[in-house]
Amino acid sequence: MKLCELTIPFPAHAGEIVGERLENESGISTMGYSIDTERKTPDVSRLRLYFTDRDDAVRHIDRIEELFRSLNLPCAIEQKLLDEDHYLSAYRSFLKPYLLERLIWIVPFARDQFDHHAGRRAVFIDHQYAFGTGTHATTHLALSLLVKFVKRKHTPGRMLDIGCGSGILAVTAALFGYSDITAIDVEEAAIGCTADNARANNVIIPRIMRGSVETVAGEQFSLVLMNIETEIILSLIERTAALVAPGGVLILSGILRERKREVRDALKQLPFSIVRERSRGDWHAMHLKRRPA
């Protein structure tokens, strides 16, 4: 995995406003970021932004430069690719837990490092060698739509997580009562990662398999989640639709906002109604319901 790190030095006095604008107004969707000040240069802070790859980082450079211009700050951007080991050490150092839908804590580190409110659930994602810590916009959108759906009173049925990554979506569903869960991914690393995170959260995911939609062809599920690239969503949408039982739910995330119309057009040919849509930065997600037979 090659994560891309962008580093921008700026005057330390502006640290608070840079962080506030980045969080609330910039439209910049990162996997995470940090603002650090070193002892030997106390007047200079460094904003470090982490993206899934170089292309993802480059797409955001114009907005980053616009953010710094609006604050009358210099913007000299340094790019660096990180291998998996560097990714883990750099990325874990600033990950922070957050409360989702006022109901469940998403905690991107080990259980013994976080003391959450006893009245709320928490998902612990300590094994992060596959995509999906809950901090990237696409995962956040998928989690938000999932939690909004599963917190309502209903009987959990069969659940399928396509492109399970770290297993965060499958683990969250298990914490809300789903037991018949299948998690699939084309990457071998994701299979072990999902199993590790299931154990870390004391939940059982009965089927964790390497593969794609063909692996479960002919089966049907009451809840299907797919957080994956737009191009792959479009290429798999018909086969994925066949996996959703009549009356079942399909949650799609990983859709580039500029391409959401393409996904909507593809869905027009399929027996689905849009229940809810959400956007975050450059990304879009959909909660769909399959019409009864």
Image (cartoon, helix red, strand yellow):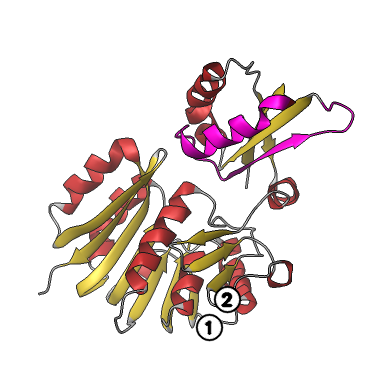
**Residue 161 drawn above or below residue 140:** below
How far apart marks 1 and 2 lie (CA) works out to 6 Å
Quadrant where the C terminus is found in the figure: bottom left
> Measuring 51% from the left and 73% from the top, which residue is drawn there?
171
Q: In which quarter of the view is residue 192 placed?
A: bottom right
Q: Which label was assigned to residue 204? A: 1
* Residue positioned most to the right: 40
> Could you say where residue 84 lies in the image, as x and y percent from the top left?
69, 49
> Measuring 60% from the left and 30% from the top, which residue is drawn there?
18
Q: In which quarter of the view is residue 98 placed?
A: bottom right
Q: Nearer the viewer, residue 22 or 293?
A: 22
* Helix, strand or loop under label 2: helix
**Residue 273 drawn above or below residue 280:** below
Q: Which residue is mark 2?
A: 198
> Measuring 43% from the left and 84% from the top, which residue is drawn there?
179
Q: Amino acid at mark 2?
A: Ala
> Could you say where residue 21 lies in the image, as x and y percent from the top left?
53, 32
> Measuring 83% from the left and 28% from the top, which residue is drawn there?
42
Magenta-tinted stretch: 13-42
- Other-residue count near label 2 (Cα within 10 Å), few / some / many at <14 / 14–19 / ≥20: many
Q: Nearer the viewer, residue 67 or 265?
A: 67
**Is residue 18 shown in magenta?**
yes
1 or 2: tag closer to the N-terminus: 2
